[in-house]
Amino acid sequence: MTILIPQPELSEGHIDDYDAKELVLDGGFVVPNKTEAFDAPEINSFGNSFRDYNAESERQKTVEEFYRQQHINQSYDYVMKMREEYGKLDKAVMSIWECCELLNDVVDDSDPDLDEPQIQHLLQSAEAIRKDYPNEDWLHLTALIHDLGKVLLLPQFGQLPQWAVVGDTFPLGCAFDESNVHHKYFTDNPDFKNPAYSTKNGIYKEGCGLDNVVISWGHDDYMYLVAKENGTTLPHAALFIIRYHSLYPLHKAGAYKHLMNKEDEEDLKWLNIFNKYDLYSKSKVLVDVDEVKPYYQSLIKKYFTEKLRW
């Protein structure tokens, strides 16, 4: 079953100039009433700017150590090994909502903006999007499930280290762009001195499409595999958001765009819309799970089978 979602008409300049302060994203949609629309805050729940990796705090030290380990260990060979292992989808059989509830025990050490259980971040993002775009139910569900791959941190799923599950993602098989956060730690990655991986294109051809590019392993790629292999009827743009929502060097700094194809360019417009809600909806104000649960269960039933292989 194919679901056709009309693509928003955004100019190239609109996409390239997207930044944290561009809070009104019309994207071809009816612009929400500004008095009712989601209002992105200026600071996170710790009193710092969002995604500020230099602010002095104990949590920032944890975040930097996380990225040191991630940049050293996430190599091309490592990612290929993990995709083969977790692509088997033999870790569990459960529903989407059951997976949401598992995330109550997960806190993301790579995130400088949030220390609440992950299910709250999922619901905060989904509810903010639902408020502004009430007719795009596929986007509401995408927000709810985009981080479910973080169950990789739990024992049932191998209890992978944080650096193998969360954090910003980046392509492997080509040069590490300097826009990657804490770029300095890539010098100890085994791929750094590999001549085949040291050029801008590396092992890829310009315009090859992101589907043909190896991306660092984590919850993004895992949830993408789960959704795709279980036959979701979500549109392609939803799968793109799930797989690349942590690829901040691309959608925040414009890096690696030379590897994109035309389909990627269209899907990136949706990701830029989604990103505002993913990043700026993190809050200490918690969502009433019981109140919103029936709505999201109806969406799960619409776009997924009752039980999925994980």
Image (cartoon, rainbow, N blue to C red):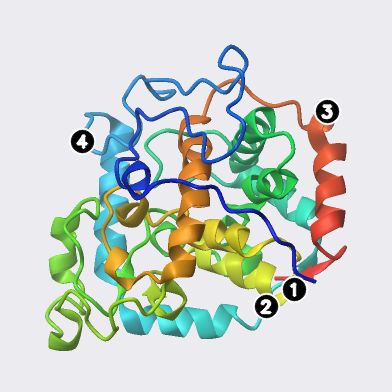
Residue 162: % across, % down: 43, 57
Residue in the picture at 47% in, 76% down: 211
Residue 125 drawn above or below residue 37:
below
Would you say residue 96 is visible in this rendering? yes
- Taking 221 as reference, is 48 left or right? left
Q: Which residue is mark 2?
A: 89
Q: Label 2, secondary structure: give it.
A: loop
Residue 261: % across, % down: 40, 72
Q: Which residue is mark 3?
A: 291
The reply to whether callout 1 and callout 2 are in contact (CB within 8 Å) is yes
The mark nearer the N terminus, 2 or 3, is 2
The amino acid beneath tag 4 is Asn
Residue 251 drawn above or below residue 52:
below
The mark nearer the N terminus, 4 or 1, is 4
Spatial separation of the CA atoms under disc 1 and disc 2: 9 Å
Residue in the picture at 49% in, 59% down: 266
- Taking 61 as reference, is 108 left or right? right
Q: Which residue is mark 4?
A: 54
Q: Which residue is mark 1?
A: 230
Q: Label 1, secondary structure: give it.
A: loop
Residue 286's quadrant in the figure? top right
The mark nearer the N terminus, 1 or 3, is 1
Spatial separation of the CA atoms under disc 4 and disc 3: 38 Å
Is the residue marked by circle 1 packed among few (<14), some (14-19), or many (20+) residues within 10 Å?
Answer: some
